[in-house]
Image (cartoon, rainbow, N blue to C red):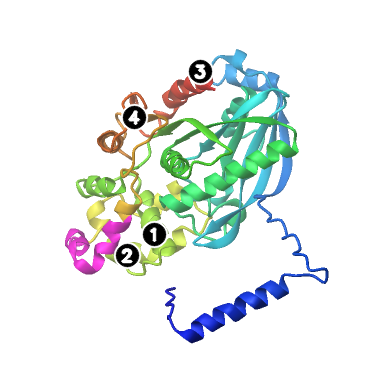
Amino acid sequence: MKYTVHSNSWSYISVLLLAMFLFIAGCDNNGENPEPEPEDKSVLIESTLVYTASAAQIKLLAQFSGFGLNINEFKYDANVYKVTYKTTYNSEDITASGLIVLPKTTDEVAMISFQHGTITDHDDAPSNFSESDPNALLYGALSSSGFITVIPDYLGFGSSSSVLHPYYVEELTASAVRDMLSAAKELAVEKEIHFNKKLFLAGYSEGGYATMAVHKSIEEEDPEDFELVASFPGAGAYNIAEMQNYLFGLTSYDDPSFIAYLIRAYEVTFEYTTIRAIFFKEPYASKIPGLFDGTKSSAEINSQLTTNLSDLFPGDLNEKLSEPGNAYINDAFEANSLTDWAPNTKMFMYHGESDTTVPYENSLSTYESLISNGASESVLTLIPLSGDHNSALQPYILDFVPKLWALR
């Protein structure tokens, strides 16, 4: 909203009268100004202890997991809490959720936030994990090795499932994770866990994108309560505009749910009412909203779409995207690509060289952009992994976790 100030005598008198009124209203009967009410800056709403994993259990699970990590690093029992916390969605207050794992120790510990990959089924949100869930091993192990471990659900899942997840939307991704970091700090204080301010970030696939978005946000805002040490983003589609060019060069794509998810998220989050009809042919265009109702997995959504891109996309899609009236689409892809900055804190990028879901070249071009923007090669490292989008996950974990331990 734009406000215009008119310079005239009536405005001057009005300002004086308003100032006198505020002064009188602000004084009590003794002529003293009352103390202002303290602002509630708490973010954490509620925490519930879900289960406790002992160090012995974690060592045993790690020993037989096949990851080959040094089990002697797992020293502490870990308490797993489901939490809700305050954040915002499109400038409106909303309650979000996730898991926070606290090591049972009186030693000072660092914090790591691990951002998960793409999910579409609400049941797959981390806050729904049980003790037997395979993902619980990684989170419990990180905490047992001396970290407050933060696992966000993301907006659109858990307590915020009333909204559609803003898939690959930079600002909302970063702000929701950052608010959960603040909630984790508050929980640590409440449970008398001593946080030393050192922060690490990691995540794979969409979690890689989220990790880089949070890293960028933290460097821009420079919060006093956290000292970012390093991040480990893996296999994210950081350059969304280039991802579009990659898809347009293919005849088939095994994961059309990812494309539909992005377009549907931008349609809802940014209120782009025409974007879905521009991108997809019928019957798929009309199907897509119902596919992302939170009850279906990515595999189920894929089965309702088509891997044949000539059947999914209109033949004149490129021409439509070149029309001036549709410039907002490419602008949105560019605005949410993470290629317009340069990290000053250590970042280790990872990507499988055989990845066809998100090609290795996407990380390579992002790396080159960040270096071109001024990032030092001593700060930014790109690490190629053997494997595709799924099989490169294990070598990613095997490489980043020892680096994490060395830097804590």
Amino acid type at mark 4: Gly
Tag 4 secondary structure: strand
Mark closer to the observer (4, 3): 3
Q: Height in image: 291 above or below 71?
A: below
Whether residue 323 is visible to the viewer of this picture, yes or no, is yes
Q: Quadrant of the N terminus?
A: bottom left
Residue 406 is marked as: 3
Q: CA distance from mark 4 to mark 1?
A: 27 Å
| Image position, residue 395 (x, y; %) | 42, 23
| Mark 2, residue position | 275
State which tag comes first along the sequence, 4 or 1.
Answer: 1
State which tag comes first along the sequence, 3 or 1.
Answer: 1
Amino acid type at mark 2: Ile
Tag 3 secondary structure: helix
| Mark 4, residue position | 352
- The residue drawn where x is 73% and y is 44% is 48
Residue 266 is marked as: 1
